[in-house]
Image (tube, rainbow, N blue to C red):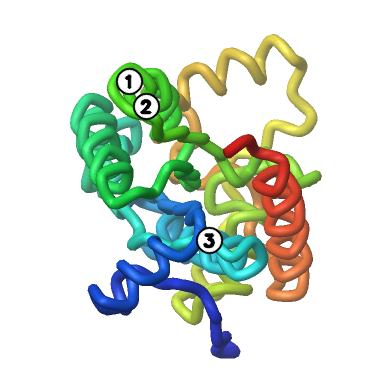
Amino acid sequence: MEKSVYKVTDVQNNFDPDLRKIIKTKKQVAIIPVGSLEQHGAHLPVSTDSDIVTEVAKRVAKKCNLLLLPTVTYGVSFEHAPFFNLSVTSTTLQNQMVDICRSLGENNIRKIIILNGHHGNQEALSGIAGKISKTSRVKVFVISYWHHMSQEFDHAGFVETSLMLAVSSKVRMGLARKGLVIDKMPPRQKSKISKLASTHFIRATKTGVWGDPTKATKKDGSMILSEIVRNIAKKVSKLPY
């Protein structure tokens, strides 16, 4: 894996005097990556969602000159039981993110982007902007990164495995196996199985893999990653302050 050098204001690797100066001298926009810790088949680590969203956030932060916050790695992944997951409830995740956003507001940061890396987090994150707006002038925008690529997303399949090959050295391709593929299913069956997966992922997929990771490549992952970053950067540039 090639190491990238990011010239971004990374909060967790910075110092109080420098951060106070940065915030004071210009309008800062913060980005908070939110991932999960859950099973991703036998070939991807449980940190997959967090690893991918962290890399996307770093690149968007560099491109848009954002204040990069540490990744929130605990998400809402109960649907993956009995396979491994470390989960918090939707209420817990939402309350934590509300507190973080309010704290950023107290530090004079008025615009916050929450970059979501896990489908199960969406419900918890969707209500944050409304809660914040009632008591603060802070504006919060939630972006789920997979909505900004042309490929149809999967879970530990071709797309996610390719992305991990592009951002991590932790992929075990020798253990990659084809999982649930729904391309040729009729719409009604697709809808039914997607609904089942949202609450009992293993019952829907059997192996915990949605898609076929066996043909994933680092090259494909780099192309998909670039598309995601480019499209999110465009969206960020148009968000009101």
Q: Residues within 10 Å of mark 1 (few under 14, many from 20)?
A: some
Name which quarter of the figure residue 94 lies in: top left
- Residue 184 in the figure: left or right of residue 135: right
Name which quarter of the figure residue 7 lies in: bottom right
Q: CA distance from mark 2 to mark 1?
A: 5 Å
Q: CA distance from mark 3 to mark 1?
A: 23 Å
Upstream in the sequence, badge 3 or badge 2? 3
Dot 2 corresponds to which residue? 128
The residue under the point 39% across, 62% down is 24
Point out which mark residue 218 bears.
Answer: none
Asked which secondary structure carries label 1, the reply is helix
Upstream in the sequence, badge 3 or badge 1? 3
Dot 3 corresponds to which residue? 66
Asked which secondary structure carries label 2, the reply is helix
Point out which mark residue 131 bears.
Answer: 1
Tag 2: amino acid: Ile
**Which quadrant would the C terminus be assigned to in this image?**
top right
The residue under the point 56% across, 20% down is 193
Q: Residues within 10 Å of mark 2 (few under 14, many from 20)?
A: many
Tag 1: amino acid: Lys
Above or below 57: residue 209? above
Q: Who is closer to the viewer here, 36 or 185?
A: 36
Q: Residues within 10 Å of mark 3 (few under 14, many from 20)?
A: many
The residue under the point 51% across, 47% down is 209
- Residue 143 in the figure: left or right of residue 103: right
